[in-house]
Image (cartoon, helix red, strand yellow):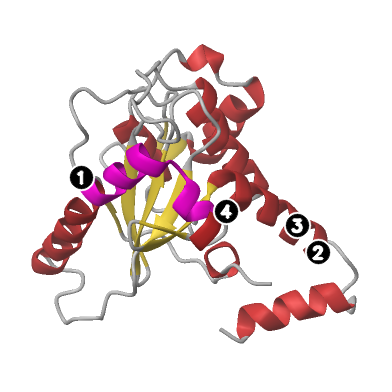
Amino acid sequence: MQSPKLLSVAFPSLRCLRPPLPSTGPNFGPVTKVPEASKKFILERYGTYWSDSEGSVKTRPLPATIDDLAKMFHECKFFGYMTPEICALLLDISEFGLAEHRPTNTIIGLPVGPRFYMKFLEQIWFILFVPRYRYGISGYSPDIPYTDDWFEEAGIARDKALAEDYDPKLCKEVSRIGTAGVEFHKEVAGWQGSTLQSDLEFSQLAKAIMGLPAKHPARVEMIRGIFSR
């Protein structure tokens, strides 16, 4: 039992990749509807930053747009280890923090909500929200080969183009069959994927196992799985 994206060694995200969202797409609704525990968590965990220009710690307000949310998550150990608190926050945002969206015409399809992309290690990752539902999705691309211009404008442009090329495919699949592909095949539109609910359940299990005594068989096996990758 392994989930690399939850238990791998994490390093800060290198940069945000946020393809333009549809102008008619939903955005954040009243932030007051998000449960207090999640509002407190996001402000305590991501609500402060260092301002080089002013030489002091600054405080961010609650995010008003999906772009604001992505900026709060930028340069943090977000995809390296999705804790139960982070998963619960993302689910709460999806259910309570997004503006109402018109339902799709399909029976099993879902409305395509705001999403953002980030480069993390060798993959491009994304989070997609489903307004008014706890059906959000996380996923990541196949490994991107290292090149000498990895950190330069040309490399960043290629990553951005890859995310922009994938985004319509993601939207099409979610609007057509919802999360069925993720739930049954662990992929979405050709990339690896999982539901935020399954991420939450696994992170809760991992946290419980890591709280066991050091020599407990379940804990030993989980640690062995991490370092055998």
Dot 1, how many residues are within 10 Å of its Cα: few (below 14), some (14-19), or many (20+)? Answer: some
Question: Which amino acid, by three-letter code, is at mark 3?
Answer: Leu
Per the image, the residue denoted by label 1 is 19
Per the image, the residue denoted by label 3 is 205
**Is residue 49 found left or right of 118 in the rendered image?**
right
Per the image, the residue denoted by label 4 is 82
Of the numbered discs 4 and 2, the one sitting upstream in the chain is: 4
Secondary structure beneath dot 4 equals loop
Per the image, the residue denoted by label 2 is 209
Q: Residue at x 49, y 23 (%)?
A: 132
User: x, y (%) of residue 26?
Assistant: 32, 23
Q: CA distance from mark 3 to mark 4?
A: 12 Å
Q: Residue at x 57, y 59 (%)?
A: 81
Dot 2, how many residues are within 10 Å of its Cα: few (below 14), some (14-19), or many (20+)? Answer: some
Secondary structure beneath dot 2 equals helix
- Work out whether residue 207 can be spotted: yes
